[in-house]
Image: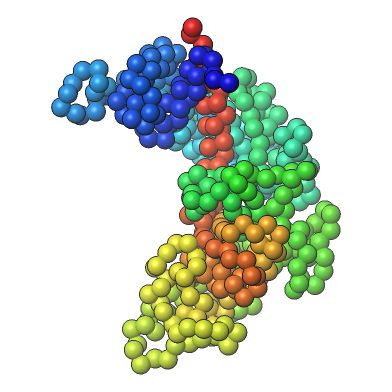
Amino acid sequence: MPASPSTARAINDRLALRLLQQEGPLTAGQLKQLTGLSRPTVADLVDRLTAAGLITVVGESGEQRRGPNARLYGIVADQAHLAALDVRTEGVFVLVSDLVGRVLAETSVPIGGDTGTGPAVEQAVAAVERTAKEAGADRLHTVGIGAPGLIDPATGDLRDSGGLPAWHRSLAANLHERLPGARVTVENETNLAALAEQREGAARDRDTFVLLWLGHGVGAAVVLDGTLRRGASGGTGEIGFLPVPGTGSLPSATDCDGGFHSLTGAAAIASLATTCGLPTPARTDGPGAAAVVRRAVETVTRAGADAGRRETAPARTPRHVPGAAARPEGYAESDHGEGSAPAAAIPGDHPAGRFLHALADRIAVGVASVVAVLDPGCVVLGGEAGQAGGAVLAGLVAERLRRMSPLPTEVRASTLGGTAVLRGALLTARDHAQNELFTPPDRT
């Protein structure tokens, strides 16, 4: 059955607004070309969206022909302001943007582990209010929050999770009270990171993939056929609880110690570095783990480059890795893992190389389990440590995965790393706001 005139107008309006969001300011002629709509239909929708206060003339195209056809139309960006929060165990990161996602102000507030729930919530809410004021926002339309832990699929609230600060659960309710009229949404941090990687990062060309988050803790997000999967209880991707060999114990319903977390969490990465002869990181959180991984990658990259310049030096291939001669120039081939950092080029007899090989062994255990169940075709190593490992660590994990699984799987390094949660929270807030605001009133 054909759409009614009002439905057709709404579809055309949303299409035009999405194009203006994605492409930036456009002329009526460019909208006609991109939408495939007729000139009169485009003229009508431009008048309709302008009257609704959604778009306005922002300049001219610079074409030789002046006049109405040269006018550039853009979204009225200050029609709504958005806030995004990345809530962590040790503090909160806040940014405020306009409707098109342009960041206007941002801040971070450390919150100590001994801070009570009330004072901690007050610090976080005050940071949001202060950042909004700095951005010139009289009110916030939508607030997107990314936090560790499980989200109740029935209520959308953060569930009580062992080991996480109590103030996390109180934050959304307090923001509702202090920001009247604002829509406040909460989402698991790893899920938001996956959305950001899909829209702006390493998975832009993938409808199906898994993001493995390697930060202070360990998590995973699953995107199948373009849709984020949460599971019956909101727990899809709680890979830190995955029972794995090499931990000496089993995780419990309230504690992931003994699970995959014990192999690849930040504290485990720091301990592994010490065991392999590297300096003990000063911090055992996500940034601390990222620092030791980054230094190890830089060290083996320099060692590989030096070996490449010594033409008479034999290639060094670790005993447990079958394969090719050293090829240090391969480090720069790609940011997407396979073929970009040959395992044989990473010296296994150097402390940094020993560390990266051992870390890749650990990561591959969890990745192989996910691949065997989901067959995603692509795994992105995210979080601070995943991004720090880059193509080198992704290549090592991919090499092990090829030996462990018959399912072809590309392993990529995150391009957003620790910023992915904040970006995902902003994208989610922007989507909510635009879905509401990009529905112009029906003008029959």
Q: Position of residue 32 (x, y in %)?
A: 34, 26
Nearer to me, 117 or 253? 253
| Left or right of residue 348, residue 165 in this image | right
Examine the rendered structure and indicate whether residue 430 appears above or below residue 165. above
Q: Residue at x 62, y 66 (%)?
A: 407
Examine the rendered structure and indicate whether residue 95 appears above or below residue 367. above
Q: Position of residue 127 (x, y in %)?
A: 57, 34
Examine the rendered structure and indicate whether residue 285 appears above or below residue 57. below
**Residue 122 in sight here:** no
Total numbered badges shown on the rendered structure = 0
Examine the rendered structure and indicate whether residue 222 appears above or below residue 277. above
Nearer to me, 351 or 226? 226
Q: Residue at x 46, y 27 (%)?
A: 15
Q: Residue at x 39, y 91 (%)?
A: 313
- To which quarter of the image does residue 246 belong? bottom right
- To which quarter of the image does residue 142 belong? top right
